[in-house]
Image (cartoon, rainbow, N blue to C red):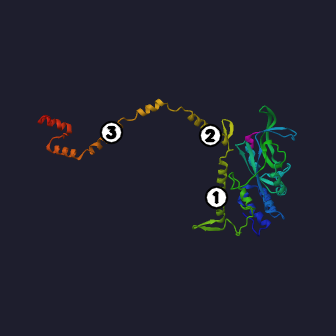
């Protein structure tokens, strides 16, 4: 659903009243009409920038199971409201008006124009958050002053409800109470400076990236005003998105379906990026170990200290004694030594005189080994003397 250039107030209101997203977010006709008139009025405020005319979505804690004090009550002051009762009441909060600064009496049933003329916003969603034990709500605000208050750190929220049924008082955690509320119906949400519940905290801005996963689709309403770049949405096509079809690979697909698929894909990308950013580890990422909180940096420092201590222990180990080194040397194989002597022997045989080798070969040819006898000069003289006698006379 978009604003068209030739839109009239009556035409826009009629389209808004039948829009599926608007019906989903604001089931009651009078509430949906109030939102439609407020959106039209905000967009057509003169001398106002588009950003100022854009309704804003917010979220906040609003109630907690347990004891609650109502000092302004005359018949009773302290009441007990427990989770089963709050669960039963929760649906009545959706579609309730948002009012600014002070609580206002809300007529029931609402007159036809009351919501449009008196409300500053509307509650669009409510749920119980198991992580913190609080009930939370989201709401859309369209009046400029109320948007400023929701952005301020000095304002919070306060819910109002009518008691439909109650039991007598008693004690809860040893604290006396006057009545126990066992059924009720929400009437409105007020933006106030002194919330009844101290833990309500600051009101948070809501940025929608996709059709919300708890059943609402306020993103579609917000996109009536602005595109992703923050500028007003302008389409050259002004026909019915559901009726117009486009040929996609031989299949006729409506423009609305194409837009919905595209937005879903973009939303999934944004969600993945958001999850990745949340899961990114930094030095300041906190962990709770055995009831004690610490940071990732502290754990890394402990790991480094442990490794440093282990390294020092390795350095302190004693060196090997000399006796141990001798024992290691004694273990070397002794057969290496004979191998070292074989080489000189072989060289001696290869270097023997050629005559010796020749005689050896001749002896082998005759079938026996002949060893040559070599005489010196003195031996030859003695042999001659023995054969021929002395040469002296």
Q: Height in image: 381 above or below 93?
A: above
Q: Residue furthest front?
A: 393
Asked whether 2 or 295 is in front, the reply is: 295
Asked whether 221 or 207 is in front, the reply is: 207
Please state, as top left, top right, bottom left or bottom right, where the C terminus lies in the image: top left
Residue 185 x/y as whole percent: 78, 46
Residue 2 x/y as whole percent: 73, 64
Label 3 vs label 2: CA separation?
58 Å
Asked whether 217 or 359 is in front, the reply is: 359
Of circles 3 and 2, the one toward us is 3
Quarter residue 265 falls in: bottom right
Residue 84 belongs to magenta span? yes
Of circles 3 and 1, the one toward us is 3
User: Which residue is label 3 attached to?
Assistant: 341
Q: Secondary structure at mark 1?
A: helix
**What span is colored magenta in the figure?**
81-86
Label 3 vs label 1: CA separation?
86 Å
Residue 135 belongs to magenta span? no
User: Which residue is label 2 attached to?
Assistant: 304
User: Which residue is label 1 attached to?
Assistant: 265
Q: Residue at x 84, y 47 (%)?
A: 193
Q: Secondary structure at mark 2?
A: helix
């Amino acid at each position: 659903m978009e604003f068209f250039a030739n839109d009239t107030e009556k035409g826009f209101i009629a389209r808004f009243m039948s829009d599926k997203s608007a019906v989903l977010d604001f089931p009651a006709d009078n509430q949906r009409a109030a939102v439609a008139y407020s959106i039209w009025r905000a967009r057509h405020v003169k001398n106002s920038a588009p950003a100022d005319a854009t309704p804003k979505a917010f979220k906040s804690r609003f109630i907690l199971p347990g004891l609650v004090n109502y000092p302004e009550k005359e018949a009773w002051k302290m009441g007990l409201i427990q989770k089963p009762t709050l669960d039963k009441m929760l649906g009545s909060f959706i579609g309730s008006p948002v009012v600014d600064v002070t609580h206002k009496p809300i007529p029931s049933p609402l007159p036809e124009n009351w919501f449009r003329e008196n409300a500053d916003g509307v509650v669009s969603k409510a749920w119980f958050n198991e992580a913190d034990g609080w009930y939370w709500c989201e709401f859309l605000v369209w009046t400029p002053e109320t948007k400023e208050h929701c952005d301020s750190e000095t304002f919070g929220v306060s819910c109002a409800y009518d008691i439909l049924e109650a039991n007598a008082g008693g004690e809860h955690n040893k604290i006396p109470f006057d009545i126990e509320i066992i059924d009720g119906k929400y009437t409105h949400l007020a933006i106030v400076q002194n919330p009844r519940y101290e833990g309500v905290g600051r009101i948070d801005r809501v940025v929608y990236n996709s059709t919300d996963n708890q059943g609402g689709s306020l993103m579609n309403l917000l996109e009536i005003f602005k595109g992703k770049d923050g500028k007003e949405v302008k389409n050259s096509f002004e026909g019915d998105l559901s009726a117009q079809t486009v040929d996609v690979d031989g299949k006729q697909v409506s423009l609305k379906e194409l837009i919905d698929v595209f937005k879903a894909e973009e939303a999934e990308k944004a969600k993945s990026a958001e999850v990745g950013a949340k899961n990114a580890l930094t030095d300041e990422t906190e962990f709770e170990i055995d009831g004690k909180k610490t940071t990732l940096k502290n754990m890394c420092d402990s790991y480094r200290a442990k490794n440093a201590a282990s390294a020092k222990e390795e350095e302190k180990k004693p060196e090997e004694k000399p006796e141990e080194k001798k024992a290691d040397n004694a273990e070397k194989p002794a057969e290496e030594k004979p191998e070292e002597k074989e080489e000189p022997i072989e060289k001696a045989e290869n270097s023997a005189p050629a005559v010796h080798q020749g005689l050896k070969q001749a002896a082998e040819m005759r079938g026996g080994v002949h060893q040559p006898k070599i005489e010196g000069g003195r031996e030859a003289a003695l042999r001659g003397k023995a054969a021929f006698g002395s040469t002296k006379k």
